Amino acid sequence: MTEVETAEVEMTDVQEKISRPVGLLAELTHRCPLSCAYCSNPLELDPRSAELDTATWKRVFSEAAALGIIHIHLSGGEPAARRDLVELAAHCNAEGLYANLITSGIGLTDQKLEELAEAGLDHVQLSIQDVDPAAADRTGGFAGGHKRKLEVAAKVVALGLPLTINTVIHRGNVERAGAMVRQAVRLQARRVEIAHTQYYGWAQLNHSALLPTREQTERAVAEVEALRKELEGQIVIDHVVPDYHARYPKACMGGWAKRTFNVTPKGLVLPCHAAQIVPGLDFPSVKDRSLADIWYKSAAFNAFRGTSWMKEPCASCERREIDYGGCRCQAMAIAGDPAAADPVCMKSPHRPLIDALVAADSEATGEAVMRGFSRAAI
Ligand code: SF4
Ligand code: FES
């Protein structure tokens, strides 16, 4: 048997035990015209000079198709900052991949939207910060941004592309969560994602200014859930509730290296967008290894796959194959141990750390620090 055949046998053997990924989040760039305080991108951003070139992204998408991936999420930063966005969307289409654009809408001209539709883009997810234009522009740090976003939403619908509105909930807009669902209906979105801030990357710096109180959170969750019934058949509501106030954690990423992964602007392949917080893991690059090799065989992807890495209380917990121990990055950030139960969990010995954070945040009055980007870099 040749060396190549031996490698193929080994890969097949591994493949039988590991599920195939279904989605890839392509962080095409970290450049962004907005400066949201709840940005979950890392503190240190990849510069434009380090971004993968067009040919490499196309190879990555071809490898993704061969790996069995269905959805490619073209994201950032702001993906419209990439001049090759239409070419990349066309390549996804040619490979039979469902291409979803995740955008702030800023920098996305009507002509670019028409070209993207022509290239076979399948879906647009547009972020909108608020229902109040002044508050929305303040949150994004971009004057006139809200007005442009509404125009982009109308253009997406006019082109016949399915539209999802993404809204991140924080202390500044939590009282308008329901109004944001109704705004999405008015914009003829098919889906709205109401996602309470996830405290990773830059957002973690700002949790004391962003975290709503428990009462505010409960009111917002109840309002959105009531709308889910009222608006059934008109819009699909995806509701990501804040886990600091929950009893059990979310199954972050649906489980580490189970369904989806990210590729950073410079080409690192990560099981989730915050994974670089976990020490001791060497995240491979698409420049050095194929996606298949990374997904099935890399030490970083296998580190927290499944349940065998778990310690107590997760190891013997009846929810271990429901939430997979929650979020490894939150366990690292709060408990200092990526193999610990997510400290949000009521069974975690670290839960008092979350309770102390929530108590301190509800007293805090400080202002959030906006994400700093250089507009000139766009
Ligand atoms: Fe999930 Fe672990 Fe908590 Fe059980 S103990 S609910 S598996 S985080
Ligand atoms: Fe990394 Fe949750 S963000 S596992």
Image (cartoon, rainbow, N blue to C red):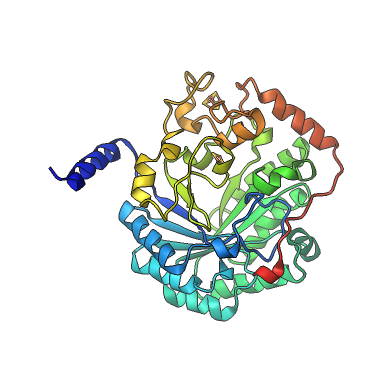
Q: Quadrant of residue 111?
A: bottom right
Residue drawn at (78%, 38%) of the image: 213
Q: Is residue 10 above or below residue 93?
A: above
* Quarter of the image where ligand 2 sits: top right
- Residue 67 is left or right of residue 163, and the answer is left
Image coordinates of residue 288 in percent, x first then y, are 40, 52
Q: Is residue 366 above or below residue 248?
A: below
Q: Quadrant of residue 356?
A: top right
- Residue 8 is left or right of residue 202, and the answer is left
**Quarter of the image where the C terminus is located:** bottom right
Q: Is residue 195 above or below residue 346?
A: below
Residue drawn at (49%, 51%) of the image: 268
- Residue 238 is left or right of residue 303, and the answer is right
Choose between 361 and 340: the one closer to the eye.
Answer: 340
Q: Is residue 167 above or below residue 257?
A: below
Report how many numbered discs are placed on residues in the image.
Answer: 0
Is residue 327 in view from this perspective? no
Image coordinates of residue 222 in percent, x first then y, are 68, 42
Choose between 187 and 10: the one closer to the eye.
Answer: 10
Image coordinates of residue 366 in percent, x first then y, are 85, 45
Choose between 245 and 316: the one closer to the eye.
Answer: 316
Image coordinates of residue 129 in percent, x first then y, are 70, 59
**Quarter of the image where the N terminus is located:** top left
Residue furthest out toward the left: 1
Is residue 114 in view from this perspective? yes
Residue drawn at (41%, 35%) of the image: 302
Residue furthest out toward the bottom: 111
Q: Quadrant of residue 210?
A: top right
